[in-house]
Image: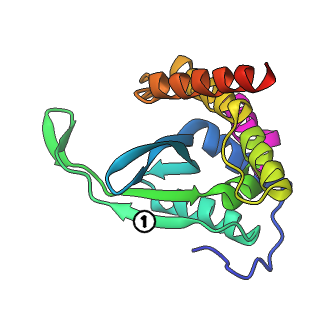
Amino acid sequence: MANQQGTLAVTDFEVGWLAGIIDGEGTIAFSVYPLRHNGKILQDVRVKPQIIVTNTDKCLIEKVADIFGRRQIGVHFQTRTQHGRSFEGNKPTKYRPLHVTNISGFLRAKKALEFVGPYLVSKKAKADLVLRYINQRELKRSINHGASLDAQDIRLIRDILIYSGENSVKGAKTKHLPWIEGLLNEHEQRGRRQAA
């Protein structure tokens, strides 16, 4: 399992291997949720960046967790039971357990994307967009602690959602895209009124 002390160096080979696994088996997720207060949707956005790798091979997922752990990047590891049946030949078999590593949140995702992002191929463009968003928000928060999202932030959220939808084999869930576009329109109109 992961080396929590980070005492063993990560080799260039391991970084390349990890990038290949993320490109092939992983997901760079960028989940967007409306903020709620007392059950009411607020005109604000919650964003959750994640790097997720899933596989039925536990050793592979443990190696992913180990490499990130040695870089002192926190990884959540879990095993999920899959329901239903698959078929080998004509014989039904039970699904094997699914093992998952999940790096979640701004600080962990930033460290992970800075570490492995330059080596990605198929997921590099999305990794760059997500890292750009994280850095943009980090800068604004350092200048104005607790700064709420502005039009520039919402525009980048929209661009990431559009990119995800256009580049997903399954067709990414973009149910929040109309809401984000509405928020962007409100922010842009407010900005034009303030400039006038």
Magenta region, residue range = 114-130
Q: Relative to residue 49, is residue 68 drawn left or right?
A: right
The amino acid type of the residue labelled 1 equals Gln
Q: Residue at x 16, y 45 (%)?
A: 84
Q: Residue at x 73, y 82 (%)?
A: 5
Residue 26 in view here: no
Residue 194, how many percent across, how many down? 75, 27
Residue 181, how many percent across, how many down? 54, 22
Instruction: Say what secondary structure mark 1 lies in.
Output: strand
Specify whether residue 147 is painted magenta.
no
Q: Residue at x 67, y 79 (%)?
A: 4
Q: Nearer the viewer, residue 133 or 124?
A: 133
Query: In the picture, residue 141 is in which quadrant?
Result: bottom right
Q: Nearer the viewer, residue 154 or 66?
A: 154
Residue carrying label 1: 78
> Local crowd at mark 1 within 10 Å, few (<14), some, or many (≥20)?
few
Query: In the picture, residue 2 is in which quadrant?
Result: bottom right
The secondary structure making up most of the magenta span is helix
Q: As drawn, which residue projects farthest toward the front?
A: 196
Residue 125, how many percent across, how many down? 72, 28
Specify whether residue 128 is painted magenta.
yes
Query: In the picture, residue 60 is in which quadrant?
Result: bottom right
- Considering the image in quadrants, where does the N terminus appear? bottom right
Q: Residue at x 70, y 37 (%)?
A: 150
